[in-house]
Amino acid sequence: MTYSIDFRRHVLAYKESNNLTFEKTSEHFAISLRTLFRWHDNIVPCSTRQKPATKLDMDKLTKDVEDYPDDYQWERAKRLNVGQPAIHYGLKRLKISYKKKR
């Protein structure tokens, strides 16, 4: 569950207006101490992770898709020496999907 930004601002404003410590604020609102520290540093919640691909070279995957457009994910995984889920997430990161046929 994510707390709204309004609530976060309210909690931090309450802390400042009453000159409370993080510990007292944590007890008053029943919110963990670490959460209050995180809100103090950055009040806006992170919506997505910005983590690069570690096992899969995205340039090689792009070239592989260009060279073999109709291959299955497990075939790509075998060629690139990774697992099929890595190919799945790599294709998702590149915004590539199969054309749906009716």
Image (cartoon, grey):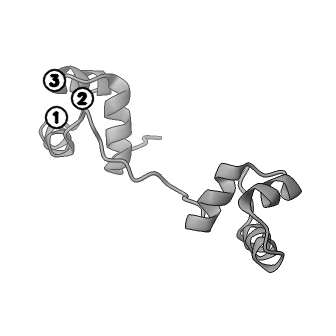
User: Mark 3 is on which residue type?
Assistant: Arg
- Between 9 and 95, the one nearer to me in the picture: 9
Residue positioned 37% across, 34% down in the render: 88
The mark found on residue 76 in the picture is: none
Q: Decide: is 53 above or below 17.
A: above
Which residue is tagged 3?
A: 79
The image quarter containing residue 4 is bottom right
> Callout 3: few (<14), some (14-19), or many (20+) C-alpha neighbours within 10 Å?
few
User: Mark 1 is on which residue type?
Assistant: Tyr
Residue positioned 56% across, 66% down in the render: 41
Residue positioned 19% across, 22% down in the render: 81
Which residue is tagged 1?
A: 68
Give the x, y percent position of residue 8: 73, 67
Q: Is the C-beta separation of discs 1 and 2 under 8 Å?
A: yes
Q: Nearer the viewer, mark 2 or mark 3?
A: 3
Please say whether residue 92 is visible from this viewpoint: yes
The mark found on residue 71 in the picture is: 2
- Between 52 and 40, the one nearer to me in the picture: 40
First reached walking from the N terminus: tag 1 or tag 3 = 1
